[in-house]
Amino acid sequence: MAPPVTRKHRVLIINAYFDPWRESTPTRLFVPRPMAPYFLAGHFDPDHCEVRVWDEVFHGALLDTKLFAWPDLVVFTGLTSAFDRARQLSAYVRHAQPKVVTVIGGHIARALPTICAEVFDYVCQGDAEEITDVIEVVLGPSCARKEAAPRHDLTAPNLGVGYVETTKYCNFACSFCTLTGEGRPYSSYQTAQIERQLDAVGRVHGLLLSDNNFFGNNRRDFERRTRLLGDRVRAGQFSGWGCLVTGDFFANPQNLELVAENGCKAIFSGVETLDPKVLKSYNKKQSLISHPLSLASACAKHGILFDYGMMVDFSQQTMAEVAEQIDAILDNPRMKLPAFVSTTIPIVGTPYFDQAVAKGRLLPNVLLSDMDGVKLVEKPLEPVEQVAAFYGRLINMRGRQGALVRHAVRHAWHWRKELPWDLTALSLLMPLQRYRRRRGIGSFAQMITSWREAAPTYNAGTDAPRRCYTPLFPMPERFARDFEPLQVTDSRGALTDDFEQARSRQVGFGT
Ligand code: B12
Ligand code: SF4
């Protein structure tokens, strides 16, 4: 229990993050933005608590040592691979302020419950609402806000984009997906809850839905949520919205008509790979009908921009096969380049991770923080050094920059009559911005840290550890373990004892 304070309780909510490109500077132009910090912030009563959010994606690496001594309570969220980062930051705040209380929840806590219980004071397995239990115990019942709504006011500058979630989790079970591992049922928010979120967003240029799958498995419910958004577009709250759907959405053309009528302007779908054999191996049959060209054409007819992500899996594909797919896209101005290319990640807790372990596919000396989609962590079909070098060139489009620029211009020109000017401009600029190594601008400390990072090798076995594993300033010996990386595999490629212990099940709030 924190000591009584006469001022407001100070709450710091941190989205811990390791930038795969090893940049410590802010990534302001990334969409979508992580919303968990702002959902969590909404549960604290503003009359009793002063809440600050530090999102290491949007604000860059947290290197401001003065902030470590500020909070009474620190709440952590983040992607699974960011566990080490959350641990480092919790060490900094405990060192600066021994009475601070730390809480973690979300993907990290679900995948690694045991080690989280050792490192943090409270470990939450549930959704954002579970933070109210912690607030009541640690700060007192009056500090928890009743009808909570996300704190969109804390997202400033929001660059004209607002975020809302209308459903949670997913009705599919792809083997590589974290949601399959977590096994929570797909569910929709009630109308009043969505309205509350929309009211909290206020007037913005465009709205992005954070849903994993806006379409889902209940047509009437999909129609309800779509019309709700349409009403807000017609009322002038935002000019349009974008969402993420699964491939089965496109099977019925009426779905596209309905979303278009209700102001949808952009659709993202996880095509993942153009290779049906690989899709089947992931249990991702819903994407078998999803060829990016036919989907882009269908969307463009309704003035909707189509986008997709692509995964490459060198444990099933050769470099020549991958190169052929990318070059075929670059040769065809009608096809859109994927929004991002990533390796398939064996995310801890997924069936895909278990298969990779059972088949001995993990490379030796893999750290949890290596699992960011930008490094090889699985044994490829071909020699690992060659594949890593090839992959590094591919995701930076090295040797393909001319073809990339030509493709972007010809692609935007081809679709200009179907798409409004702002979406045409977006489809021109997005690939040029995504397929190059990011050089960001941030605080002096962030820029220096980025410049000092070793160059990436795209191979977990040979990448030098990130700089943040060395503390920012000398720390007492008792914090030494907090700066050691959680190692997933040993020098033979077998799971380490530390990792097995870290992920063993020990569930429940406050463990
Ligand atoms: C925004 C986003 C990003 C952002 C930043 C994410 C971040 N947190 O830092 C960016 C664009 C950087 C990103 C990158 C990637 N992402 Co992403 N991303 C998302 C996305 C679309 C939205 C997240 C969000 O805001 N959701 C809404 C909020 C409200 O939900 P939430 O974060 O899940 O939190 C809920 C609960 O978990 C819980 N909760 C969370 N934290 C806490 C804390 C406490 C104390 C409590 C009580 C509860 C709690 O409460 C919330 C619900 O009420 C999700 C999909 C989705 N719909 O969630 C994928 C998702 C998180 N991403 C995913 C993946 C796979 C990736 C990539 C690996 C993709 C790739 N192949 O390149 C990369 C990772 C690169 C890296 N560095 O490792 C996976 C999960 C991966 C994982 N377990 O780590 C998701 C779930 C998509 C999916 N279905 O596969 N992503
Ligand atoms: S469709 Fe997407 S969100 Fe759903 S299980 Fe598959 S990868 Fe995960």
Image (cartoon, grey):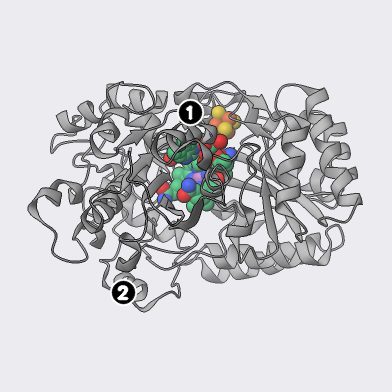
Q: Where is residue 115 in the image (x, y as percent from the top left)?
A: 25, 33
Residue neighbourhood size for the residue with mark 2, other residues' Cα within 10 Å, grouped as few (<14), some (14–19), many (≥20)? few
Image quarter hosting the C terminus: top left
Residue neighbourhood size for the residue with mark 1, other residues' Cα within 10 Å, grouped as few (<14), some (14–19), many (≥20)? some
**Which type of secondary structure does the marked residue at label 2 adopt?**
helix
Q: Which residue is drawn at 61% across and 66% down?
A: 157
Number of the label disc, if any, that sits on residue 157: none
Q: Which amino acid does label 1 sit on?
A: Gly
Above or below, 216 against 153 in this view is above
Q: Which amino acid does label 2 sit on?
A: Trp
Q: Where is residue 207 in the image (x, y as percent from the top left)?
A: 73, 52
**Would residue 134 be seen by someone viewing this image from the given angle?**
yes
Residue 510 vs residue 263, the one in the foreground: 510
Above or below, 34 against 436 in this view is above
Distance Cα–Cα, label 1 vs label 2: 38 Å
**Which type of secondary structure does the marked residue at label 1 adopt?**
loop
Above or below, 266 against 276 in this view is below
Number of the label disc, if any, that sits on residue 126: 1
Q: Position of residue 128 (x, y in %)?
A: 52, 36
Ligand 2 positioned in quadrant: top right
Q: Position of residue 61 (x, y in %)?
A: 37, 62
Between disc 1 and disc 2, whose residue precedes? 1
Residue 276 vs residue 133, the one in the foreground: 133
Q: Quadrant of residue 105?
A: top left
Label 1 near ligand 1 (CB < 8 Å): yes
Taking the image as shown, residue 229 lies to the left or right of residue 376, namely right
**Would residue 342 be seen by someone viewing this image from the given angle?**
no
The outermost residue toward the left is: 477
Q: Residue at x 43, y 72 (%)?
A: 439
Number of the label disc, if any, that sits on residue 451: 2
